[in-house]
Image (cartoon, rainbow, N blue to C red):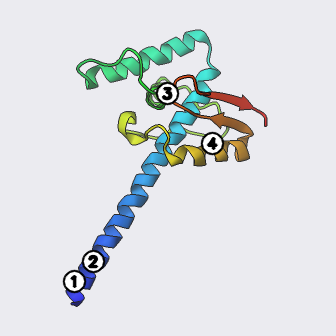
Amino acid sequence: MTTLLLSVLCLVAVYAVWKYLRFVKRHKAAMNVVLAKITFGRLSASKQTEVDLKAHEILAPLMRKPPEIFKTKTHKFGWYALAMAELGIPPAVEQAKWNYVSNPFFAVFPGDSAFKLICEYMKRKHGIEVQLSDEPGAPWFIKSGV
């Protein structure tokens, strides 16, 4: 009986740790997406082109046929964050830094609850209102100074 109870407690503990680590990973990836969207919008057209080319350069050896156009803004700005980090472009938000995300395609998905937390944080801490959406025709914009 005690062995069964200990086994169940161990499984619950492992599950709780896994959920926490998964949340941290999603949160870091969502932060990268939001920071990349803010930063990319403030770059010159030539720098934006450089970032796009670097993102596709990073993807080229990882995929048989890398996408010419990203299917979601979440994926696009996840890879742009990685590209900007490699190019040495710092985030446009004070005291922010790029997070290591091994694969932006699977780290966070559109509509993830982590985006709500990050958007609320950006508004409260930095006065930047961020509205995210991957639906065609839906708003995806950033307003500074609330």
The amino acid sitting under disc 4 is Cys
- Tag 4 and tag 3, C-beta contact below 8 Å: no
Outermost residue to the right: 146
Q: CA distance from mark 1 to mark 2?
A: 6 Å
Tell me if mark 1 has few (under 14), some (14-19) or many (20+) residues whose alpha carbon lies within 10 angstroms of its own: few
Compared to residue 111, the image places residue 42 above or below, namely above
Residue found 59% across the figure and 46% down from its top: 116
- Amino acid identity at mark 2: Val
Rounded to the nearest whole Å, what is the CA distance between mark 4 and mark 2?
37 Å
Q: Secondary structure at mark 4?
A: helix
Kindly state the secondary structure of the residue where label 3 is placed: helix
Point out the image quarter for the C terminus: top right
Coordinates of residue 98 in the picture (x, y in percent): 51, 37
**Residue labelled with disc 4:** 119
Secondary structure, mark 1, is helix
Q: Is residue 126 left or right of residue 84?
A: right
33 relative to 124 in the view: left or right? left
Q: Do residues under tags 4 and 2 come within 8 Å of each other at their CB atoms?
A: no
Q: Marks 2 and 3, how far apart in space?
A: 41 Å
- Residue labelled with disc 3: 73
Is 22 in front, or is 4? 4
Quadrant (top left/top right/bottom left/bottom right) for the N terminus: bottom left
Label 2: which residue? Answer: 8
Say whether disc 2 or disc 3 marks the residue closer to the N-terminus. Answer: 2
Tag 1 and tag 2, C-beta contact below 8 Å: yes
Of residue 69 and residue 56, the one placed in the foreground of this image is: 69
Mark nearer the N terminus (4 vs 3): 3
- The answer for how far apart the CA atoms under marks 4 and 3 are is 15 Å
98, above or below 87, in the image: below
Q: Amino acid at mark 1?
A: Leu
